[in-house]
Each structure stands twice: as structure tokens, then as C-alpha cells.
Image (spheres, grey):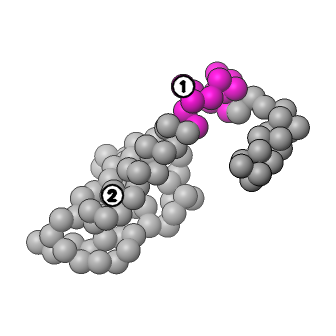
Amino acid sequence: MTDKCEICGTEGDDRRTLHIGCMWNMVEVSTLFTENQETKMYELVMCKGCRARLLQHVKTWIEEHGRLADSHLDDDGIFGYSKEEFEAMQKQKVEG
């Protein structure tokens, strides 16, 4: 069966459906998500290339912004930096 990737629009046989079950309305993130009324999960059909890019972003997010990479997170996972500390870090990144 040939399916269409809902992200890039390519057609092919190797399409998979991403299922996300959460308390957020994923349609607010992207109108490409649809809610499956039976499972109450949000779904998005994607090709292998889009899946690889998504997983790379997830990997980067976890490695660069996860609790193990940054000790300045509070119990809700929110950065606990002061505005001045955050701005100084951003300046260091730009200056290299």
C-alpha cells in the first residue's frame, strides 16, 4: 500500500504512524496531527527520512537539554537560570 508522508508529502510503502498520547492538544503544535477518537492519541504518518530527522531532534533535545546535561532545572524541568545567567551563556555561545 502506498501512503503519503504528512510532513514532506512524498509517497511510498515505508510510512509509519507516530502515536503521541499526552495531555496536550498536539494540533496546537501542528495541524498535521490528527486525533484518533478511539485511542485518544494524536497521529502523524511520516516517511523514513522525516522519522530519522524527528528522532535526531529528540536525541539532541535529550542530550543537550536533559536533566543530566544541565543541573539548573527545577522539579518541573524548567530552567532555573536568572535572566542575567541565561544572557551570559547565550553571549558565550555566540562568541565561541
Q: Quadrant of the N terminus?
A: bottom left
Q: Quadrant of residue 69?
A: top right
Between circles 1 and 2, the one closer to the viewer is: 1
The residue tagged 1 is 68
In the rendered image, residue 6, in percent from the top left (x then y), is placed at 36, 70
Q: Is residue 57 above or below residue 12?
A: above
Amino acid carrying label 2: it is Arg
Instruction: Farthest residue to the left: give it.
Output: 1
Q: Secondary structure at mark 1?
A: loop
Q: Badges 1 and 2: C-beta atoms under 8 Å apart?
A: no
In the rendered image, residue 36, in percent from the top left (x then y), is placed at 34, 54
Q: Secondary structure at mark 2?
A: helix
Q: Is residue 83 above or below residue 42?
A: above
The residue tagged 2 is 51
Q: Which residues are magenta?
A: 65-78
Residue depicted at x 33% and y 57%? 52
Residue depicted at x 19% and y 74%? 12
Majority secondary structure of the magenta segment?
A: loop
Q: Which mark is residue 45?
A: none
Please tell me how crowded label 1 is: few (under 14), some (14-19), or many (20+) other residues with Cα within 10 Å: few
- Tally of marks: 2
